[in-house]
Image (cartoon, rainbow, N blue to C red):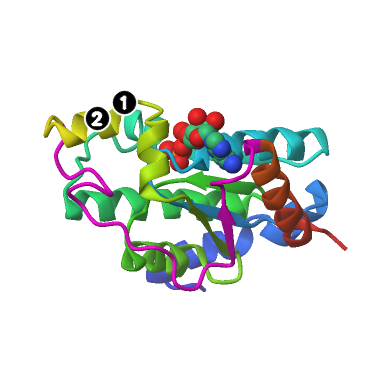
Amino acid sequence: MKERGNNIFTIYDEVIQQGEKEELLKQKAVSIWMTGLSGSGKTTIAKIVERKLHEQGHLTQLLDGDNVRHGLNKNLTFTEEDRTENIRRIAEVNKLFNACGIVTINCFVSPTVAIREMARDIIGAKSFNEVFINTPLHICEERDVKGLYKKARKGEIKNFTGIDSPFEGSTNPEMTIYTENKTAEESAEELLNFISTKIKYD
Ligand code: ADP
């Protein structure tokens, strides 16, 4: 007889395992964790890559800061404590998608090494791939896709990453993409090549 306290483990031992789902989908489930300043290009690149993977017959899920904060994490703010909780929940969601055999692509500023290491720990180093979208602040600010930098400079938004809240670049990412002198399509191509090697099922 199994002990009551072990029930959770028992359930996960008995359900269909990740490997069987990966076999069904003919892909390895990984998490692509894109980090970088607001406007660096995370979402733009991820959307192109997700579409191409889909066309190649892969099952994917894109998670983006804005949509997660409107749903699952709508009770969270941008204090350090809430930023950590935001990423913790997202990482747990990644783990569930991966268990389902799904390739997860994340677009979150995730500004500190500590926060990204927490995500790596939760998801598991084997599945976790940190991709640093390395775009200089002045370029992100010039792009100012959502007008947020202008507001942050005027003090209308507080704790904005890169302005009055720090961003720690990746020190040891699985991949770095420099977007400054490239088109979004070229950046996406680089990421697609990287992901293709990671999800290959053989
Ligand atoms: P983030 O998700 O990192 O906040 P977005 O993807 O919303 O950034 O915005 C990035 C902006 O930069 C888009 O308007 C995009 O068209 C532009 N851009 C210019 N060059 C590139 C590139 N090489 N890669 C990605 N985006 C680029």
Q: Quadrant of residue 147?
A: top left
Secondary element at image label 1: loop
Real-space CA distance between mark 2 and mark 1, rounded to the nearest whole angstrom: 6 Å
Secondary element at image label 2: helix
Q: Amino acid at mark 1?
A: Gly
Residues packed near mark 1 inside 10 Å, few (<14), some (14 to 19) or many (20 plus): few
Q: Amino acid at mark 2?
A: Lys
Q: Quadrant of residue 187?
A: top right
- Of 187 and 91, nearer the camera is 187
- Residue 64 visible, this angle: no
The answer to the question of whether label 2 and label 1 lie on touching residues, with beta carbons closer than 8 A, is yes
Q: Hey, which residue is sitting farthest left in the picture?
A: 155
- Of 106 and 202, nearer the camera is 106
Count of number-bearing discs: 2
Residue 7 at x, y percent in the picture: 45, 64
Residue holding disc 2 = 150
Residue ID at (64%, 38%) = 183
In the figure, is residue 4 to the left or right of 24? left
Residue holding disc 1 = 147
In the rendered structure, find residue 184 and report the number of the disc placed on it. none
Q: Quadrant of residue 128?
A: bottom right
Residue ID at (32%, 68%) = 114
Segment tinted magenta in the rendering: 157-184
Q: Main secondary structure of the magenta part?
A: loop
Q: Hey, which residue is sitting farthest right in the picture?
A: 202
Residue ID at (17%, 45%) = 159
Residue 3 at x, y percent in the picture: 43, 73
- Residue 141 visible, this angle: yes
